[in-house]
Image (cartoon, rainbow, N blue to C red):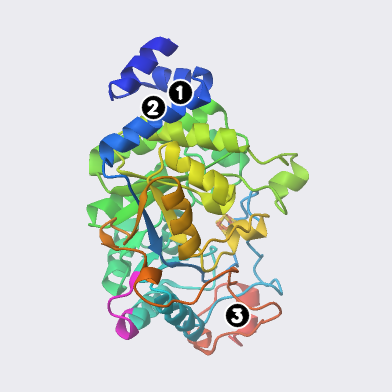
Amino acid sequence: MLNAALDKARAGQRLSRTDALALYTEAPTHVLGRLADAARARRHPDRVVTYIIDRNVNYTNVCVARCNFCAFYREVGASEGYVLGFDEIFRKIDETIAVGGGQLLLQGGHNPDLPISWYEDLFRAVKSRYPDFKLHALSPPEVLHISRMAQLPVPAVIDRLIAAGLDSIPGGGAEILVDRVRKLLHCYGKATADEWLGVMRHAHMAGLRTTATMMYGTVETLEERLEHMFRLRDLQDETGGFTAFITWSFQPDHTELGRDHGVTQEATGIDYLRTLATARLVLDNFDNLQSSWVTQGGKVGQLSLLFGANDMGSVMIEENVVRAAGAAYCMDELEIVRNVEDAGFAAKRRNMHYEILGDPIFRERDVPRMLSLAKARAEGDTHVPAELLNYEARSRAGRAARGQ
Ligand code: SF4
């Protein structure tokens, strides 16, 4: 079984589920790495590794989904709950532009007190102030949440968000696209596997490009990790709309899953590299695989370039979600480029469509170094943005806070 799978992988042939499982479970790690590196080289023979300068902004941490692997969310009415004001978001955009960035990765909790008009007004306000700035925003479960709140079908929500300025959709909230796992992680309600894929299908049909993600290392089996990859491969065959695949391991600190269900250990670096390499071999219709150095650290992130990754993801300016669960790795552009070049690749800046924008920006002009991660908001800042009063809240706590 293993030999047949190895032969197919060496020849660059499409792998079956049986092939992938044999490679994942039986191939020595260095062999898996070499196969993935060869597959990467077939798609990217120029030895270029890309990265993007953007900012990861979480517009709210208030969430009704309550996934048990999440340390980021706060319940409706909690004192630590926040919604960023438009002015705060503009400031973050200004800071992003100052270090050469051109995009926000904008995601947040499922806040019942933000109607679709809040998102539309925010997007319009961003586009009118910063016409060329890109909004990579709202993962599929957020789109579903907005569609349920607005009682509108998903395609109509996507069309309205595009009209307001949405440029592309991040692949968050996929976790593992198998409903048995999603029920155990309390994320089946926010989006079933079919619903997640359905939002992406609609987005691709509407002309948006999106990414795809996988969070592994909770309660899933290896077969279920592979099933996730095969479901993505099937949709990519159908639409071709995914630009990249990003995988990372569950971060257990401060999560209900870690605290109450005993999933306290993070997957190891070898597990990460084997998972990444297997994904490169299975996802033969994905051009780009990102290194998740934010969760794995810079050194494993660098090694991932030899296990199938061709992209270092984003220069990290701000991070709130995985930091809440214990991971706080930070690399600015200079550090990312140092790691890429030391691994024997040329580093190039890109946009969300993976079009090359140029060489590292710090070689063109002075940019401030970003050696610590910014947060969504300063500790203890609980102010309620003025414009929120213009939107009708649905929760009792939200109505009380807005005097409605
Ligand atoms: S992962 Fe997202 S949807 Fe789930 S609880 Fe956290 S913020 Fe809410």
Q: Is residue 287 left or right of residue 142?
A: left
Spot occupied by residue 101 in the image (x, y as percentages of width and height) = 39, 71
One can see residue 171 in this view: no
The answer to whether residue 132 is magenta is yes
184 is higher (above) or lower (below) than 150: above
Disc 2 residue type (three-letter): Leu
Confirm if mark 1 falls within 8 A of ligand 1: no
The crowding category of the residue bearing disc 2, from other C-alpha atoms within 10 Å (few below 14, some 14 to 19, many at least 20), is many
Q: Nearer the viewer, mark 2 or mark 3?
A: 2
Is residue 257 shown in magenta? Answer: no
Q: Which residue is mark 3?
A: 399
Segment colored magenta: 127-134
Q: CA distance from mark 3 to mark 1?
A: 58 Å
Mark closer to the chain start, 2 or 3: 2
| Closer-to-camera residue (113/91) | 91
Comes first in the chain, label 3 or label 1 = 1
Residue in the image at 58% along x and 50% along y: 297
User: Does the CB distance between marks 2 and 1 fall below 8 Å?
Assistant: yes
Could you tell me which quadrant the C terminus lies in?
bottom right
- The kind of residue on which mark 1 rests is Val
**Relative to residue 61, is residue 23 drawn left or right?**
left
Packing grade of label 1 (10 A; few <14, some 14-19, many >=20) is some
Q: Quadrant of residue 403?
A: bottom right
Q: CA distance from mark 2 to mark 3?
A: 56 Å
Quarter placement of the N terminus: top left
Q: Secondary structure at mark 1?
A: helix
Look at 42% across and 23% down and name the residue there. 20
* In-front residue for pair 54/59: 54
Disc 2: which residue: 35
